[in-house]
Image (cartoon, rainbow, N blue to C red):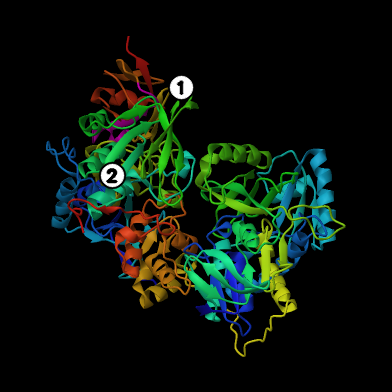
Amino acid sequence: MDSYDVVIIGAGVVGCLTARFLSRYQLRILVIEKESDVGAGTSSANSALIHAGYDPVPGTLKAAMNVRGNSMWDDLAGELDFDFERCGDYVAAIGDEEFQKLFVLKKQGEQNGVPGLKILSPDEIRKRIPNINHDVSGALYAPTAGICDTFAVTIAAAENAQANGVVFKFNTCFESFLMENHQIFGIRTDQGDICCKWVINAAGLYADEVMHMAGSHPEFQIHPRRGEYCVFDPACFQLDTVLFPVPSEKGKGVLFFKTTHGNTIVGPTSEFIDSKDDKAVSIQGLQYLEEQMKKIIPAADLRWTIASFAGLRASGNAVCKNRDVDYTGDFIVEADDSIKGLIHCAGIESPGLTASPAIAERVLQLLRDSGLVMIEKPVWNPFRKRRPCFRRLTNEERNQLIAKDPRYGRIVCRCEMVTEGEIVAEIHAPIAARTYDSIKRRTWCGTGRCQGGFDLIRVVDILARELNLSLEKINKKGVGSEFIVSETKNQGSGK
Amino acid sequence: MIPIHDYDLIVVGSGPAGLAAAVSAKKNGVDSVLIIDRDVEPGGILLQCVHSGFGLETFGEDLPGPSYAQRYIQDAELLHIDFLMDTMVLDVTKDFSVTVSNEKFGIQIFLAKAIVLAMGCRERSRAQIHLSGTRPAGVFTAGTAQRWVNVEGLMPGKNFVILGSGDIGMIMARRLTLEGAHVNRVVEIMPYLNGLSRNYVQCLQDYDIPLFLNHTINNIYGKKRVEAVEIVRVDQNRKVQPETAEIIPCDTVLLSVGLIPENELTRKIGVAMDPITGGAMTDNCFETSSPGIFVAGNVVHVYDLVDYVTHDGTIAGEQAARFIQGHRKIHQKRIPVIAEDSLRYVVPQKICPETLQEAEIQLFMRVSFPMEYPVQIRAYSDQGDIFRKTLPYVRPGEMVSIQIPKTAHDLIQASDAIRLQILRKE
């Protein structure tokens, strides 16, 4: 039986960052993931925002993790070399009632320890965002908010963890704990048993089920909350910031945000659903987005859409541990009450991405507190370098790259200018991309106006060639999502 | 340093429009012509169109797509036109500098004396029609399936539902049936066919594939691969009628829901665009608002016959030659051509009066909805009626083409603008 010190369940952003932070110590660490790639669940579809921290209720774990997490992103982005930009964000108020709410929000932010919050006059916000609703009554500005390449964060953390000795097992689903006298000695997966003393539950939408397997918190439930988004064609509309409406009891509302790839996205909707893997988009969702977005930018038009997608938030019903605060839906980041060696990260909905490095930091502290001996490795490399991105190079740099590897001269995705070299590099990367969607998330291939119209056929060919698999085996997102069913009767006319 | 090369004319795209433009420019005396294309072989989308129906107007023969393309490729080779294949054009400027990238030479710059843009069109995607449901494998554009089946010899599914009655969708319905797949039905949200009537007869009727007008896909099911679709009827306002919902099991959805001229490069140059066609505004010489930048084929507007594409590409090439040779006057007067009422658009959007004597001018237009009765296209201006043409019927799926009669030239020359309208013939 394989044996490790620590097993992390789930290779989302929380699991991967925890693995990366833990890789500093002399421990044998394994991450198991039921999907074929890192960041395939909740981490695959969210707003990619690094929230300033004025939203969470003061005194909650969410508030503490948000503000601490926010402060960690500059170092993280520097070490792991992913896109991160502290562009700031705005909450725009329409009418007097909403304007008053900005002061409540600002005060809440200050209580949470958010620096630099400022209320802007209508003139000032109109100057900064000219196409904003002209009835804007003011805005809250938070300079510490930012955006990141959410896919790259998880991938970079996993790669760095792996470079420092962490093992990743994909297509491996947790089934149960192997325990004796309230002590873990391993876990059972659909790929066999694994021996370990410590387990970190970072199972995202399924964290409640993992928790229940250990017999703890039977009252805790994750109720998936779906959010639909629309991606706009940058040729039609670009917003160089992040723009929220005034939040309501339903949440932070439908916002506009720019991405590190240059698109503007509008979303999300907010709808509780029963299934933990139903990422369907709907006409109703789009209609809701249209209604909401026009309140802050009246000229916004859904005809600008080049893609739509949905993500699921892992909304939990945990009561805030702080007795002075009346709040349900807090994060759980704690050692299990009765089982030694088990740490839970659960109910990690927004601002989960922002909080993820702080959650990882807290998990390390919890492990230490529960008796794990953590000795630093004599050599630990905190750095990971990104691979070349053709789109961002000067023509001279491109030619230097092409001279070394001609495949960087061959553009496979015209809209986003992604080369064969970049795709091949991801297929052979430490955390390898083996599906079309994995390549899409890493290179941005197929995300433009034509939505794979040109590249899909070519990427499927490249995957088959590089992985030495038949074309019928190449899939979109794991086994069962293959593109090709068979050859034709005459096997084509061309090649 | 980035390597720089010189040509007289550069043509972007080696489909029928680009080939015709290059051949005609060369025949009209241009010394050096280069065709650049992102694919490995010239011919463009014709290479995946293995069905017949090409060339009836041009050659009086019924050819499959690749054979049609081959005739022009041969001409181009005989005329010593250069090809740079497997090469992506990154940038084109107003002063005719073309930046490209490929495996062999990396980034290079080509300088020319004129440019013909012939990038063709692309297919509308799922997101653009706001299709509800999950996002599994098995939702493809008809053109993607066409390339897989006809060029690569691969079947992307066994059991199909086709959304949209565009020509490629109907042609693929037949092709897939011949390959042993099951095509459950073609559904079209509009109350009329989107493609050519002949394709309906030859591709659907002859193979007993049902066409459901006023129907659409309301939902896609399946997590990894498509498992089923929900099909509903829509009312005259295209509103879904939920009580008509029917679940159809299938593993693949093909989208044939419209084509969009591929104009990323054109927009980057900054020429005036027509929001209705999605292509550049052009005159009857296929010159854009930027002198020396010409456009040809589906990059201007979506044609329904390749023969017309070739015809217009030939004009673009000839006029590019005149421009290079200094015979084309810059800043000459252009008379706007305006589509009114139920005419959705007209191409060209401008006429150069000086060229009226040189060549016959053809106007292409599309109507907004079918008129299954005799109609009259009326061209008029401040000078009064210019000409009229009677047609037995008009349909959105079938392009209307009208040649301007020679007798109308004087009136056109005296007009400020030419307006076109469509009238019910009494």
Q: Pinpoint residue A351: horizontal percent, then vertical percent.
A: 69, 58
| In the depicted structure, whether residue A437 falls above or below residue B21 | below
Q: Pinpoint residue A85: horizontal percent, then vertical percent.
A: 64, 64
For the residue labelled by badge 1, is the local secondary structure a helix, a strand or a loop? loop
- Residue A294 shown left or right of residue B4 in the figure: right
For the residue labelled by badge 2, is the local secondary structure a helix, a strand or a loop? helix
**What residue sits 67% from the left and 70% below the top?**
A342
| In the depicted structure, whether residue A348 falls above or below residue A293 | below
| In the depicted structure, whether residue A250 falls above or below residue B89 | above
Q: Earlier in the sequence, mark 1 or mark 2?
A: 1
Q: CA distance from mark 1 to mark 2?
A: 41 Å
Chain letter of the residue carrying label 1:
B
Residue under pointer 2: B316
**What residue sits 24% from the left and 26% below the top?**
B406
The answer to whether residue B287 is seen in the rendering is no
Magenta stretch in the rendered image: B353-370
Question: Looking at the picture, do discs 1 and 2 lie on one chain?
Answer: yes
Chain letter of the residue carrying label 2:
B
* Residue type indicated by callout 2: Ala
Q: Pinpoint residue A137: horizontal percent, then vertical percent.
A: 78, 42
Q: Which disc, if any, is residue A221?
A: none
The mark lying in front, picked from 1 and 2, is: 1
Classify mark 1: residues with Cα within 10 Å, few (<14), some (14-19) or many (20+): few
Residue under pointer 1: B236
* In-front residue for pair B89/A312: A312
Query: Is residue B354 within the magenta segment?
Result: yes
- Residue A72 shown left or right of residue A471 in the figure: right
Q: Quadrant of the C terminus of chain A?
A: bottom left
Classify mark 2: residues with Cα within 10 Å, few (<14), some (14-19) or many (20+): many
The answer to whether residue B288 is seen in the rendering is yes
Q: Pinpoint residue B122: horizontal percent, then vertical percent.
A: 36, 46
